[in-house]
Amino acid sequence: MRRVFLFLIFTSMVAVLSLQILVNRGSGEVCSCCYLTDVEPEDLMHRRFDVVILEMEDLTSSTVEALRGRCHLLLAYVNLGYAEDWRPYWSEVSSESWIHESTEYEGKHFIEFWHPRWRDVILRLIDEAYRLGFEGVLLDNVDASTILLDLNFTWCRGVDTEELMIQLVENISRAVEERYGPDFQLYINIGSALRLLRDGRLLSSIDGVLREELWHIYRDGVSVEASREEVEEALRWLREARWSGKVVLVSDPIEDGDEAREFIARCREEGFKPIPQPIWAWDYSEPPPRSWCR
């Protein structure tokens, strides 16, 4: 009888501990968060989120460890599709022949992302994220591959940039698993390259996908409804990823609490994780308001 009693006490303690871990890891929040500009870690310390995507520069391992306790999954931001001239690596690559003209985004440059040296840069950034204590990375601007096909610059004419992007992500995924094990997560921001999600090699190389501006589009400082055709096309591929067992994050520019609640409900219906990004911080300079995430 005493053994049974002790066993019941033990199982109760395990249950309480498990519940506490879930609470600490962010089970109380329905929102995810992408925080990339003017990051103040303290803004997140008293919040709970599902997934957090974070700019990792200037962070310490102790800060990352504390932030891991505020969410289910903490991902570091890495720009895969473009080189950024404010990054520490820029002095090493700026004069390379595979670095090209500026994009429409200030400080970001088109590159031959399939170049072996760029892969080395990306793997070094991922290693930095791992050593800081992040649980994975988000690879941004995968749709640079689709954009280059449309722009048809002389230096990439005749190159199947979408195929090369798939190969790059596949290559990075293998390297990451070999170095850090299967638990280190790899997410991509698919952007306008939705058709890449039909490729089984890409899907098998990632754990999750982010799509921005699914139902709402940022235009001249306001949020406007995306066309029905655009939404249905995007949902077609995102649902395919979801059915393939991938986590789907959606970030839309949101104007107020009512719009946020509608957006979160839509995401829940689809099985997606919502990032209701405030329209006034579409550059990801602050997390979603607390009142929107209850």
Image (cartoon, rainbow, N blue to C red):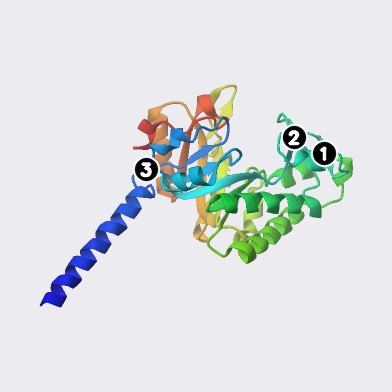
Question: Disc 3 to disc 1, how far (Cα)?
Answer: 42 Å
Q: Closer to the observer: label 2 or label 3? A: 2
Q: From the image, tell me which residue sits under label 2.
A: 85
**First in residue order: circle 2 vs circle 3:** 3
Name the element at disc 2: loop
Residue 153 relative to residue 164: left or right: right
Q: Quadrant of the N terminus?
A: bottom left
Name the element at disc 1: loop
Earlier in the chain: of badge 3 and badge 1, it is: 3
Q: Nearer the viewer, residue 154 or 177?
A: 177
Q: Which residue is mark 1?
A: 94
Dot 3 surroundings within 10 Å: few (below 14), some, or many (20 or more)? many
Q: Amino acid at mark 3?
A: Glu
Q: Residue at x 87, y 46 (%)?
A: 157
85 versus 247 height, above or below: above
Measuring from the top left, give residue 184's x and y in whole percent: 55, 58
Q: Is residue 11 above or below residue 164?
A: below
Measured as percent of width and height from the top left, residue 49 is found at 42, 43
Residue at 70 percent across and 31 percent down: it is 105
Mark whose residue sits in front, 3 or 1:
1
User: Amino acid type of disc 2?
Assistant: Asp
Cα separation between marks 2 and 3: 35 Å
**Amino acid under disc 1:** Ser
Q: Residue at x 78, y 43 (%)?
A: 148
In the rendered view, does 10 fall on the left or right side of 84?
A: left
Residue at x 37%, y 43% (from the top left corner) = 29
